[in-house]
Amino acid sequence: MSSAEGLKGSADFCTQLLRTHDFARYAATLFVPAEQRRTLIALYAFNVEISRVREQVSQPLPGEIRLQWWTDMLAGAGHGGIEGNPVAAELLLAIRTFRLPVERLSRLIDEHLFDLYNDPMPTKAALEGYIDETSSALFSLAAAIAGQQSPEIEHLARHAGLAQGIAQVMAALPLDASRRHLFVPLQLLEQHGSGMEEVFAGKETPKLRAALDQLLGEAREHLKTALVLLAEVPPQVRSVFLPLALTARDLEHMSRADNDPFVPRVTSRFRTLWTLWRASRSYVFS
């Protein structure tokens, strides 16, 4: 196999991985310029690999070993077998081509160590820190791939990530509760007279609903701020923030009085594509 064939095979692998495990971000790449798409897919496929470690191990230690492999790979030390890992190959190509900050990618890996243990998310500050290094970091890195980096874009990426990250916490609540894994801040629950066991019981109570409503309200505020800031950045970077259209849709549904946070919600791929297509033609993202 030639080098070119190998790279094409790696790119195809990343595309299929992303399409299978994170269709929302895959679909969003269909609306960015073609020259950015491959690199964005590599970035998002890397995120899939890191985010799925918890699903692939039964104990924390094997998970830590897997995450350490990625950390070592980025550091260029002790990372045998990269040529056999298409996601690693594509990510390294992306780093070289767009000079992506390795430190930011390494911090994303480090933050996902939290996923491996059943310790509760202690405070809202801790949750925001987690999201800053994961969802917000992905928006920031995507903007860099689009050729735009500035304090204003970092500010936008932070609010965009917080809106998206909180929405993802809420969407994952049924699964996380079944695993006795708490991403909703314990501090917030206790402020409303609720607690972990109410979440793990998987049954909504007025106190739990009040805590979740406050978290959703904060997500909506972050989304509102992000959309205002989006209008102030160069048009060529706006398409990488297109996933916010999905976040807006999800937050609207989750905020309804009749929404049960413990009932998993499945969105069709067609609806995801329709939401993104419609948003891509609006003035907000163009």
Image (cartoon, helix red, strand yellow):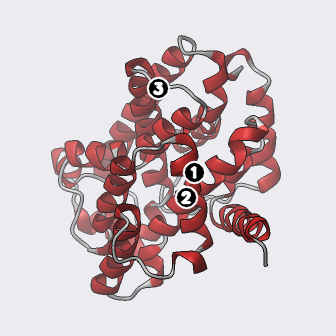
Up the image or down, 108 lies above or below 117; here it is above
Residue to which mark 3 is pinned = 149
Closer to the N terminus: mark 3 or mark 1?
A: 1
> Residue at coordinates 59% horizontally, 80% vertically from top-left?
84
* C-beta proximity under 8 Å, tags 1 and 2: yes
Residue placed most toward the observer, 30 or 76? 76
- Which x, y percent locates residue 208? 31, 52
> Residue at coordinates 24% horizontally, 64% vertically from top-left?
196
- Which x, y percent locates residue 70? 40, 69
Could you say whether the residue bearing mark 3 is in a helix, strand or loop? loop
Closer to the N terminus: mark 3 or mark 2?
A: 2
Residue to which mark 2 is pinned = 91
**Labelled disc at residue 94:** 1
Quadrant that contains the N terminus: bottom right
Q: Which three-letter amino acid code belongs to the residue tagged 1?
A: Ala
- Which x, y percent locates residue 131? 36, 46
Q: Residues within 10 Å of mark 3 (few under 14, many from 20)?
A: some
| Labels 3, 1: front one | 1
Q: Which three-letter amino acid code belongs to the residue tagged 3?
A: Gln
Up the image or down, 231 lies above or below 185; here it is above
Q: How many marks?
A: 3
**Labelled disc at residue 44:** none
- The answer to whether residue 18 is left or right of residue 2 is left
Q: Residues within 10 Å of mark 2 (few under 14, many from 20)?
A: many
Residue placed most toward the observer, 184 or 189? 184
Q: CA distance from mark 3 to mark 1?
A: 16 Å
Query: Residue furthest toward the front?
Result: 2
Quadrant that contains the C terminus: top right
Could you say whether the residue bearing mark 1 is in a helix, strand or loop? helix
